[in-house]
């Protein structure tokens, strides 16, 4: 792959840093360079730092990329998810189904509208909501399902959509990790009523912090645009505040970064796929390591490269993180089991129904993966895991 001068500079800087720091391999390093800086500078010069034209341009480019009608740029995926529930009119007395294994933001927003999250177990092969467990969780109060495409791997949408239709439930897609993810050739975030993306620093497209709400529904986008902006409505050039809204807007400064990142997204995704392929080749034969599973009808974008350790590995996950750190490698847990977090305990979910999520919470491990990661570094990480296992 051809590299630009600026990328060469970064590569040199990385290799110099690595020599000085004896092979420190970070979990993530955003792929961001001079182009983003120049775009931000232009926004500075325009004088419109908050609510200027740039966020609007970013929205329209995002809709083109996804092949969807509307987008509303917001301050994070969490605020997009909150707005999505507001758009759908979810409130007190309602239940919303949420996979138990996810970043807690997915479940937290359900509390924010006064509704109750209903936690459902995952399929350990994909780390996503297990559609076979979905129907048992539906009651007469269920209004919506928040589907997560965790780590960039799509949820099993065909079955989920069928069940949602059967029970007349809306679907919100938490596509925080899943820009560019494909399920049967269609982009994640475009299946449900509303899709929500994250541009946090660890995400594939980053603005530092940021997010996007997308939808084909004309009414939902009107609500989102208004509610992210204090509940504003402009009629005949007059400003009215029709609802007590929030300030969830994405600033033009950050939107400028997002526009450049969106131009680079194919390159970003391609590189992640290349690196992940090497990881999987190197780790497939290691006893006790289960690399990410890929079905033929999906495209995994590897927002995170997450493996599962089973008992044959012989060393527990937390100890592995410690031993990797001693070798200068940053690794991390996959993500969280909501029912084990203090703020969900009061809902008294039966842990026996959430076994896979607990296993994933205990045994999943995220390995370093970043755009300028070299194949030597990938090998170094894979060998470290092998050595940890050999010496247990
Ligand atoms: C699955 C999932 N949903 C939601 C979020 C929240 O995203 P943000 O940090 O943009 O609010 C994250 C962030 O890590 C996530 O991984």
Image (cartoon, rainbow, N blue to C red):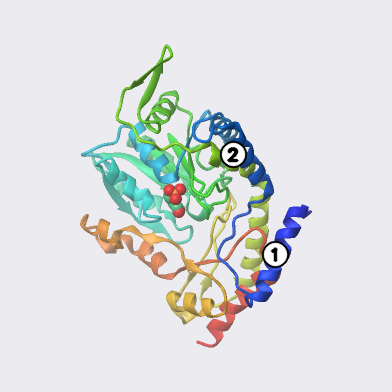
Q: Quadrant of residue 67?
A: top right
Q: How many marks?
A: 2
| Crowding near the residue tagged with mark 2, few <14, some 14–19, many ≥20 C-alpha atoms within 10 Å | many
Q: Secondary structure at mark 1?
A: helix
Q: Is residue 134 visible?
A: no
Q: Position of residue 49 (x, y in %)?
A: 53, 36
At 35% from the left and 65% from the top, the residue drawn is 358
- Up-down: is 339 above or below 161? below
Q: Where is the N terminus found, in terms of image quarters? A: bottom right
Q: Secondary structure at mark 2?
A: helix
In the displayed structure image, the side of residue 61 where residue 350 appears, left or right: left
Report the residue at 43% width, 29% height from top: 225
Say above or below: 153 vs 388. above
Looking at the rendered structure, which numbered label has been put on residue 256?
Answer: 2
Q: Would you place residue 243 above or below residue 85 in this image?
A: above
Report which residue position mark 1 lands on: 13
Of residues 55 and 384, the one nearer the viewer is 55
Q: Residue at x 68, y 75 (%)?
A: 19
* Residue at screen point 54% across, 42% down: 254
Residue 266 showing in the rendered view = yes
Q: Are marks 1 and 2 in contact (CB under 8 Å)?
A: no
Q: What percent of the width, then of the height, locates residue 237?
A: 43, 14
């Amino acid at each position: 792959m051809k590299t630009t001068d600026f990328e060469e500079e970064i590569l040199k800087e990385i290799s110099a840093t690595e020599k000085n720091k004896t092979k420190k391999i970070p979990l993530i390093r955003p792929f961001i360079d001079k182009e983003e800086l120049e775009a931000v500078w232009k926004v500075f010069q325009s004088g419109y730092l908050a609510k200027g034209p740039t966020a609007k341009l970013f929205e329209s480019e995002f809709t083109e990329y996804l092949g969807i009608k509307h987008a509303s740029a917001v301050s994070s995926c969490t605020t997009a998810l909150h707005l999505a529930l507001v758009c759908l009119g979810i409130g007190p007395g309602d239940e919303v189904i949420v996979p138990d294994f996810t970043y807690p933001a997915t479940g937290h927003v359900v509390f924010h509208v006064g509704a109750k999250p209903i936690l459902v177990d995952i399929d350990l092969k994909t780390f996503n909501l297990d559609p076979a467990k979905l129907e048992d969780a539906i009651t007469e109060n269920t209004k919506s399902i928040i589907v997560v495409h965790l780590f960039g791997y799509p949820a099993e949408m065909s079955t989920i959509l069928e069940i949602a239709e059967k029970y007349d439930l809306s679907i919100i897609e938490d596509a925080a990790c899943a820009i560019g993810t494909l399920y049967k050739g269609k982009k994640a975030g475009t299946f449900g009523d509303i899709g929500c993306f994250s541009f946090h620093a660890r995400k594939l497209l980053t603005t530092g912090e940021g997010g996007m709400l997308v939808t084909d529904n004309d009414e939902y986008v009107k609500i989102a645009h208004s509610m992210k902006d204090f509940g504003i409505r402009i009629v005949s050039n007059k400003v009215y505040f029709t609802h007590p809204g929030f300030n969830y807007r994405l600033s033009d400064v950050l939107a400028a970064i997002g526009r450049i990142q969106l131009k680079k997204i194919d390159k970003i995704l391609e590189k992640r796929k290349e690196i992940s392929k090497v990881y999987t080749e190197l780790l497939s034969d290691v006893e006790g390591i289960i690399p990410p599973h890929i079905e033929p009808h999906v495209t995994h974008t590897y927002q995170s490269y997450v493996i599962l350790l089973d008992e044959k590995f012989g060393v527990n996950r937390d100890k592995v993180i410690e031993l990797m750190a001693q070798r200068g490698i940053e690794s991390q847990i996959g993500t969280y089991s909501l029912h084990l977090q203090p703020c969900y305990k009061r809902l008294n979910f039966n842990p026996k129904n959430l076994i896979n999520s607990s296993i994933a919470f205990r045994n999943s491990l995220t390995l370093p993966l970043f755009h300028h990661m070299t194949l030597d570094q990938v090998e170094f990480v894979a060998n470290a895991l092998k050595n940890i296992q050999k010496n247990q």
